[in-house]
Image (spheres, grey):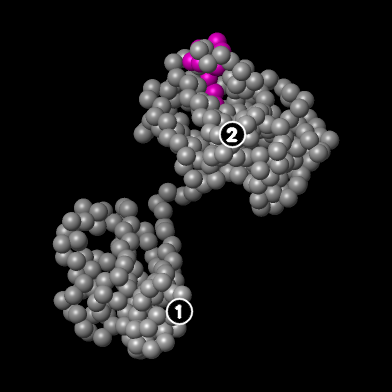
Amino acid sequence: MDVVLKAWSSINENADTVPVIHGGDYNSASHLDDGIGKSGHSKLMADAGFVDSFRQLHPDVEKYPGSSIGSSGKDRIDYIYYKGTKLNAIKTDPIVREFKGSGQRTPGYPSDHLGVVTRFKFESDTPAKLPIVGFKFDGDVSSSTASIKADVRRPSSFIDGVSGKALDLTRRVRHRYGLDLGRSEKLDFGAEKDFSVLVWVKTLPGAELGNAIVTNLDWAKARNEDKELRGSKEVTGPGWGIASQPSGSWSWIMSDGDKYRFDYEPTAQRQPINDGKWHQLAFTVKRKTKEVCLYYDCRKVATYFIWNLKSVTSALNTMIGTCNLGSYNGEGFTASMA
């Protein structure tokens, strides 16, 4: 244990900035339980500034022995330690299993040890930021952040969403018009700006796809242009977009209208969105590290290094659920959005 702590010294010393959690099967008693092992692992961890999360929340050893092995009820040899001023243990307990006889495991239980679970609360120095624009679609199209108002020229239809309601733009409804966010100065996608875009989408099973989901590009032109012309500012223009593919998957484009254009087009076998289920599509732009990360159902699926990508702020409006032609295209998007 002493060797491990020394090897991790630089990590442990920075724990007040980045908290450290250290857990596992230590196969030894704690000096906090019955005094045994005063020079063992638990004393070394305590001297290094680590807190035994279970014993911190359950200081009464007789009432809460915290057994994690055997049938005596007093053998605690599995631990979760933590270090750092931003982290606080708020609940912890072993995963209880009944042992039948000394050393005999419960039938079907895969170990002679019990699992230990600790729930932590993380205190950040940086308060969480509300999105510049975020829609809940709970019966209307008002932005939940009230930062930007959408321009809607037709009535909207709604269905049950992931949580609450969702905007219904499928072919089963009469009114299928997307949202126009305009060109607000708050929608700044400049060369120094970090930003993220996230949308939940569910289509009708087998729906015909190939439309924009959210974009500030003229998506029809960007999608149909000749591959050899990619990168031409006359063709693509600066901007970004998430869309559906006719194949049943989704796609993503980002271009500065000058030198750089990036495209992502997964197959429907890998990342379908036309299966009648809700799917989360997202990307984040990190200018400091010069990368864009793409996510499908909360899983990172691609990273693009964007090098000297310039501003992706478009001269066109930012649109949700429709192609950007400066106005609605009259067709909408064959999906529900939340």
Front disc: 1 or 2: 1
Residue 144 visible from this viewpoint: no
Helix, strand, or loop for circle 2?
A: strand
Q: For residue 266: magenta?
A: no
Q: In the picture shown, does residue 319 fall above or below 272?
A: above
Relative side of 329 to 92, left or right: right
Q: Nearer the viewer, residue 1 or 104?
A: 104
The answer to whether 218 is drawn above or below residue 211 in the figure is above
Type of amino acid at the residue the image marks with label 1: Pro
Whether residue 39 can be seen here: yes
Q: Which residue is mark 1?
A: 107
Label 1 secondary element? loop
Point out residue 45 in the picture as x, y percentages from the top left corner: 23, 68
Q: Residue furthest front?
A: 107
Amino acid type assigned to the residue bearing label 2 in the image = Trp
Across and down, in percent, residue 224 comes to 61, 18
Q: Quadrant of residue 78?
A: bottom left
Question: Which residue corresponds to the image point at 48% horizontal and 25% vertical from the top-left?
Answer: 262
Please rate how many residues cluster around mark 1, counting C-alpha atoms within 10 Å: few if below 14, some from 14 to 19, many from 20: few
- From mark 1 to mark 2, how far is it between C-alphas? 46 Å
